[in-house]
Each structure stands twice: as C-alpha cells, then as structure tokens.
Image: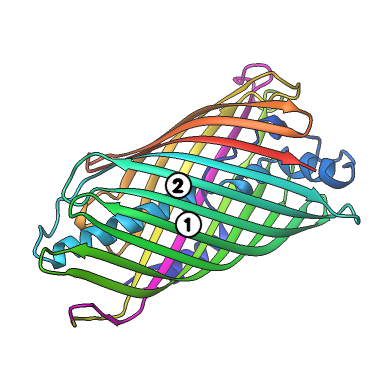
C-alpha cells in the first residue's frame, strides 16, 4: 500500500522541504567560528543565520499535507456514494494568520515557544468543494545543547470545521498530540530541521439527505515526519548574488500515515478501518535580502517543485507534481517584534489542482 517506511528512511538520511521565509530578518549568514551570544540572541545567531529557525517555525508544508488529505477524503466519499471515480479538481485559496512568542528561561539555554494559528479557506465550485476553518495551538520546550544543536518537545492541538458546499454538509475534527523537533548545523553552509508529530482525534461528518441526516464519526490517528536540508550562501560565497542577498537551496520530504478507525454510520452502515499514506518531496531555492534595521523591509522569492512519492488517495485527482512559487517581505517592527507577509502558490502540472495562500506572521521574543 505504501512507501512510508522507505520515505521515513530517506527522512533520516537526507532531509526535506520548504521555506525559511518566516524570519528573513534573522536569515543572514554568520561566521561558523563566531562565538554566539547567550539566550535568544545565541539561538537567533546560530540557527536563524542558518535558515533553520524559520523552517522550524513554519507550518506551511504540514498545512499543505493536511489540506490535500482532507480534500481527498471528500473525493473518496463522493466516489463511494455513486459519484465519479476520478477527474476531481481542487482550487483552494487560504488566509493564514499565525501568532507566536518565544520566552527565554533563566538558564539562557532553554526556551518556551507558543504558536497559535488560524486558517480561513475558500474554494472554486467543483463536485466536492468546501470552505475550511482551522485553528491550531503549539506549546513547545526548546533546549540549545550548543551552537550547533537544538532539540524541542511539546504539545499540539487542532480543531477544524469544514463546510461541504457541494452537499450542504459539515465536517468537524479535533485532535491533540505531541511534537518533537531537532535542529542541527553540520557545516558552515548546511543544516537540517526535522520534526515528528503524533496526533489522536476524531472526525464527524454530517450530510443532509432530505429524509434524514447521515452522520459518520471516526477515530483518526496521524503520524507525521518532516525534514528539511537547508543551505545558506551569501554574496561572499556566490559572485552572482547581488550585494546583501542570501541564497537558500532547500531539499525536503514530508511523510504522513493516517489511520481511520472502523465505525457505523447513523443509518446503520458499516465503515471499515483504513490506513492512508502521503509522502511529498520538494526542492526549492529561495533568494532573500535580510533586514537587520527596524522598520526596513526585506524581500524574498522562492521557486521550485513538489512531487508526491506516494499518495494512496491521489488517483481521484491525478495530480502528483506541482510547480511552487512564493514571494514575500518581512520587517522588524522593533528589535524583538517581527512581521512578515507572503503569497505562496502550488500549481499542479496537469491542471487539476491549485493551492494558494496569503500568510500574515507576527512573532515576538521575550
């Protein structure tokens, strides 16, 4: 059924995917031999300069995997209820608003990170289009072992409501679980950000049938792994870069296994337990001009591709490969407060899927 185990091995060996756009104000290169400061300043100097803090705090890849999975469940439900067996299309737009705070603890090597986010979505009409609304909360303890390694562990909560606009139904979901992270610099120009997430929860779908409401409630467990190999090169390393610009090549992989429990619908029909795998490989290059002065904007652009290595429910839409692009700009409102705005788009090469998102980020160090 899957290549999940193989992909997990690739995760551990190589790395994976996405963006260090969230903290361009911290994304400038630092000397490998430079002695770091203490506390938050040390964390930012060693891991912000390598592009790893931004990838650690960025939930874009995680959100994409969840969004595509939820849409595919809608495809599956439609097909099993007599709808078309393939040829589904998705065209989804989202507004993402994450807020975060980082608190330094007395030992000046440990931190508490709190991240709360809200996603508002909409979609162009199609046989299974929907309007999602998702809220998430993460609280994590971080410990900086030295200037090259940080680990973290914490709890995650998420709750969502999706209006099924094609049939007047709704899907509610809620989950809680654990998240663990590892950030490691292994050379002056390369580092890795890896995470593992386990979430337990339920989903409840209600669909009006005219004579009655069909209700389906299932237990759901998700195992999620992600790793990002991030390079960091300045204009001093690459002559073709304009003065003050940084290039970040990124290779990433994300793998998720979802287990849905057996249940019985409100109409007495049995629903079998299922296990679904989704594995995504991405390669991108980001160019950014970091800003270190308050109230001065730093632009960024990122381009690349995404390819689904394994997708058990992918046959409904037949869209394994995407072109990816992202533009944005960040500004330090004061030495401890950062704001970023970005627009990202994934465009399926077969023309069957498009995802776009505007993200507004506000973060503060304490």
Q: Are marks 1 and 2 in contact (CB under 8 Å)?
A: yes
Quarter that holds the C terminus: top right
Relative side of 321 to 232, left or right: left
Kindly indicate the quadrant of the structure image that contains residue 211.
bottom left
Q: Is residue 137 above or below residue 262?
A: above
Span of residues in magenta: 238-267
* Magenta run includes residue 57: no
Q: Residue at x 68, y 64 (%)?
A: 153
Kindly indicate the quadrant of the structure image that contains residue 181.
bottom right
- Cα distance, mark 1 to mark 2? 9 Å
Q: Which residue is nearer to you in this view: 13 or 108?
A: 108
In percent of width and height, residue 45 lies at: 79, 39
Q: How is the image coloured?
A: rainbow
Please state which of the two labelled residues, at mark 1 or mark 2, is closer to the viewer.
1
Decide if residue 22 is in sight here.
Answer: no
Q: Which residue is nearer to you in this view: 284 or 365?
A: 365
Residue occupied by mark 2:
282
Quarter that holds the N terminus: bottom left
Residue occupied by mark 1:
254
Q: Is residue 105 above or below residue 265?
A: above
Toward the front, the furthest residue is 211
In percent of width and height, residue 142 lies at: 75, 58
Q: Which residue is nearer to you in this view: 167 or 145?
A: 167
Decide if residue 295 is in sight here.
Answer: yes
Relative side of 228 to 276, left or right: right
In percent of width and height, residue 71 lies at: 30, 54
In percent of width and height, residue 172 lies at: 37, 62
Q: Secondary structure at mark 1?
A: strand
- Specify the label residue 288 is tagged with: none
């Amino acid at each position: 059924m899957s290549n999940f185990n193989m992909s997990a091995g690739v995760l551990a060996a190589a790395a994976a995917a996405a963006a260090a756009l969230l903290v361009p104000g911290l994304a400038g290169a630092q000397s490998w031999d430079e002695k770091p400061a203490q506390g938050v300043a040390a964390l930012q100097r060693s891991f912000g300069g390598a592009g790893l803090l931004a990838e650690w705090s960025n939930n874009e890849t995680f959100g994409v995997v969840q969004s595509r999975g939820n849409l595919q469940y809608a495809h599956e439900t439609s097909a099993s209820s007599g709808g078309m067996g393939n040829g589904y299309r998705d065209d989804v737009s989202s507004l993402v608003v994450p807020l975060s705070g980082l608190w330094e603890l007395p030992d000046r090597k440990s931190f508490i990170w709190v991240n709360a986010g809200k996603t508002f979505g909409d979609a162009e009409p199609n046989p299974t289009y929907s309007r999602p609304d998702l809220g998430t909360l993460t609280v994590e303890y971080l410990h900086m072992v030295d200037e090259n390694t940080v680990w973290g562990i914490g709890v995650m909560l998420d709750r969502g409501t999706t209006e099924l606009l094609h049939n007047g139904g709704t899907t509610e979901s809620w989950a809680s679980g654990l998240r663990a992270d590892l950030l490691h610099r292994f050379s002056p120009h390369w580092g890795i950000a890896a995470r593992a997430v386990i979430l337990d929860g339920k989903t409840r779908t209600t669909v009006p049938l005219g004579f009655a409401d069909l209700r389906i409630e299932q237990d759901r467990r998700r195992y999620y792994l992600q790793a990002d190999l991030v390079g960091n090169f300045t204009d001093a390393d690459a002559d073709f870069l304009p003065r003050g610009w940084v290039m970040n090549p990124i290779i990433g992989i994300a793998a998720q296994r979802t287990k849905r429990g057996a249940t019985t619908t409100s109409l007495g029909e049995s629903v079998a337990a299922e296990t679904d795998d989704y594995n995504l490989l991405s390669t991108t290059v980001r160019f950014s001009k970091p800003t270190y002065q308050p109230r001065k904007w730093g632009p960024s652009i990122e381009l690349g591709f995404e390819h689904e290595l394994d997708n058990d429910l992918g046959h409904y839409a037949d869209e394994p490969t995407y072109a990816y692009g992202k533009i944005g700009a960040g500004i330090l409102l004061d030495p401890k407060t950062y704001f970023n705005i970005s627009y990202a788009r994934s465009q399926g090469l077969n023309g069957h899927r498009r995802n776009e998102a505007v993200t507004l980020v506000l973060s503060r160090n304490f």
